[in-house]
Image: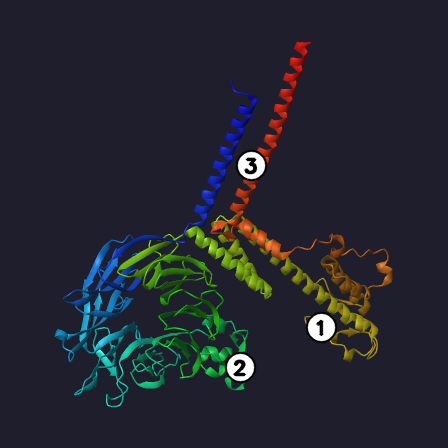
Amino acid sequence: MKTIKQKTKNKKTIKRKILFIFSAALLLSAIFAGSVLSISGEWDYAMGGEIREVYSDDLDGDGNFEVIAHAFITTGVESYSTVYVFNKTGGVFGKINTRSEILDMQVIDFDRDGEKELIVAMGSLENNDIFKPVGSIVIYGKTGDIKQHYAGIQGFVHGIYASDVNNDSRNELLAASGYELVTTAHMQCYCKVYLLNRRMEETWAFKAHDDRVLIEEYMDVYAEDLDKVLDADNKTHKEIITSTSAGRIYLLDASGALKWNYSLSGIAKVYAADIDNPKELREATAYVCEASKVSESEKLDKGKPVCYACGMDSCDDKCNVSCAEIIASSPDGTVYVFGRNQTLRWSYKTDGRISGTSVTDINDDGSKEIVAGSDDVYVLNNNGKLIWRYKTPTKVLSIHAEDLNNDRIFEIIAGTENGLYLFGADGTLYEKYELEHVVSVHAADLNNDGVKEIVAGAGFNAYVFKVNEEKLYSYSAKTHYGLAQNYYKSEDYSNALVYANKSYAYYVLADDAAGSVKSKELIAEIEKTVYIKSKEKEADEYLKIAQFYYNLSNKTDVKNITAPPGLIAQITNIIIGGGKNEIKLVSCPINGSLVNVSADVCSKEYAKLARVIYLELGYDDKVNLTELMIPESERAGWVNVTKNETVPEEIPVNEEEKTMLQKIIGGELKIFGIPALYIIIIVSLILISFIYSKVNAIMASRAAKGVKGGVKAESKGVKK
C-alpha cells in the first residue's frame, strides 16, 4: 500500500514529465521554425564540365519557361562547349554539342516566327593552327536543331547582340570579334565588329585602327537608340556600343560609322539604359521651357526634369535629360556612366574586379539603380552614389536582380566562391545557401505558381532552387513597411498609404499577426494625419478669407488689401454702395453663392467655420484668433473645449522598449537563431514548473505534518 508521500512524489514526477515534454516540444518547434530556409534545392544536373552560364526563358511560347545551361568540357583529346535545355522538372529535351568554345549566347525570337532561338557565338583554331582562327555564329531551335549558321568571321566571336538596329521590323545581328596574332614575323589582329542581316549576310564591318597603329580585340557589343533622332524617312536608328581589349569604348551609328571613342582601363562590359530620367517621370513634369534659359540649379526638381518640352522632343543634355545612358564596367572595378555625346556623367570605383551588373528600379521609386558584383555586392543610385554595400567573405562571381514574387520590389541574387546569397532591395540578407563557385545566376517562374525559382550554375552542375513563398511574403511585408515609413516621414502620404496597405496584405499572406497589427496601426496613423492635414488646410483657407473681410471692415483704403489665394478673384471688384473708398456691402461667397452683406458679417461667418475645425483639431491659438473676428455678443456662453483638453494626457512611451517588444512579438528578435518569444515562453514555463513544484512540496510537507500529528493524538487517546 502506497503512502501519502509516495503518491505526492508520483504526482510531482508525472507533472514534471508533462512539463518537460511540453517544453521540449516548444523548443524543438522553435528550432525548426527558425531553421526553415528561404532557399531549398529543387533539382540539379551534372553537366560533365565547368558551368559557364545559365539562363531561363520561354523558348516555344507555350507559357512554360525552360532552363538553358552551357558548360565547357575538357577531355584528354579535345575541348568543347555543350548546351542543355531542361524543362521545369529537370528533364532534358534539347542538347547541343559544339566543336568550339561558346563565348557568348543570347535568347531571342530572331526570325519573329513566335518561337525563340538560342544564338551562340564561338571561336576555335582550325586543326589547332594558331594562324587559322575561326569564328562562327549558330542559331539553334529549342531542341538543338540548327536553323542558321555563319562561319565567315576571322577571329573568335567574343560578343553578340541581336536587335532591330535599323528600325525596319527585322532583326539584325551584331558580332564583336578578335584574335591577336603577334609573333616575331607577324603582327596581325583578326578584329572587327560585324552587322549581319536576318539572312546572316554581312551588311558592314568596322575596324577602328590599322594593325600597325593599334591592336585591339572587340570583346562586347550592344545596341540602343540613345538620341531618338529621326532620319529622312522619319525613322529612328540604334547606336552601337562596343568595347575592346585595349580598354576603349566606341560608339557607332547604324551604318557602322564612328561617332566617338573613350579610353578606359581594360576590357569593359557595355550596356545602355535610361537610368537618370525615366520616361514616366518626364511625362509627369508640367513645365515647358527653353533649354538655353535653364540654370544649373533649375535642371532638376526633386529628381524630375524641369524642362518638359526638352525632355520629350529630344535628348538635350542642357536640360539634364537623356534618352539612355551607356553603362560600362571595367576590370579595375569601376562602373562608368556616359551620356550619348561622350560626356562622362559619373564613375564609381569598387574594391575588386566587376563580375557583372544589373540595371533596374529595385525599390519601385521611379529611378533605376545599378547593382554590381565585385569584391562585395554594391547598389548605386542613378547619380553614382552608394546606397548600400554588403561585404561577402569571398568575391562575387555573378549577380542578378529579379522581382521574385511580383510585388514591384526586386530581390538581388549573388553567387560567390562559397555561397548563393539572396538579398532584399534594402540590403537585408535573406539567406545564404552553401554552394561553391557560383558563376552564373538567373530567375524565372518555372512552375507558374507566381513565385520565381532561382537558376544557378556552380562548379559542374546546373541547379534550380525553390524560394520559400511564406518567407518571401514576410520579407516583402517588412520592405513595404519600411518604404511606407520613409514616405510618411517625408510627408508623401499618398505613397505612404499605398505601401502601408501593401505591407498589411503581405503580412496577412505571411500569416504574421503581429506584423498585420503593426501595419494596420501605421495605416490608421497615416489616415489620421491625412485627415488632420486636410482639415487644417480647410480651416486655414477659411481663416484667410475671414481675415480678408475683417480687414475690409476696418479699413477704408481698399487698394492696400490683397485677396488670399483661392478666393474668387472678382470679389475685390464687387464693392457695393458708398463713395470711392467707402465700403458698405461686399460680395461674400456663402454656401456656394455670392451674397451681398457687410464685410464684418462675411468675416464672422468664415471665422466661425474656421473655429469649429480648430476646436476639433485642438489648436487653441487659432481658436483665439478666430474669436477676435466674432462679436462678443455671439461668443457669450461659449466654452472652448478643444480636443487637447478632452483627451487625458498620455503616458510617455519609451520608443526603444516599444520597438523591442514589437520585435519580440513579431519573432524578429532571435537568440542563436531561435525567436526570443519562444525562449521567453519556455523560461516562463520552467519558472512556473519550479514555483508549482515548490508550492506542492510545501503543501505536501504541511499535509504530512498534519497526518503525523493526528496519528500521535490518536495513540495518546488509546493509552488513556
| Residue 494 in sight here | no
Which amino acid, mark 3? Ser
User: Pointer 3: residues within 10 angstroms few (<14), some, or many (20+)?
Assistant: some
**Name of the residue lying farthest toward the left:** 127
Instruction: Kindly identify which residue carries mark 3.
Output: 689
Element type at mark 1: loop
Which mark lies nearer to you, 3 or 2?
Answer: 3
Neighbours of disc 1 within 10 Å: few (<14), some (14-19), many (20+): some
**Which residue is denoted by mark 1 in the rendering?**
564
In which quadrant of the rendered view does residue 179 lie?
bottom left
Q: Within 10 Å of the Cα at label 2, are there few (<14), some (14-19), or many (20+) other Cα atoms?
A: some
Position of 704 compared to 165: left or right? right
| Amino acid type, mark 2 | Cys
- Which mark is on residue 542? none
Q: Is residue 695 left or right of residue 676?
A: right
CB under 8 Å between discs 1 and 2: no
Q: Where is mark 2, residue-wise?
A: 289
Of callouts 1 and 2, which one flags the residue occurring earlier in the amino acid sequence? 2
In the displayed structure, 421 sits above or below 577; it is above
Q: Amino acid at mark 1?
A: Pro
For the question of whether residue 649 can be seen, the reply is: yes
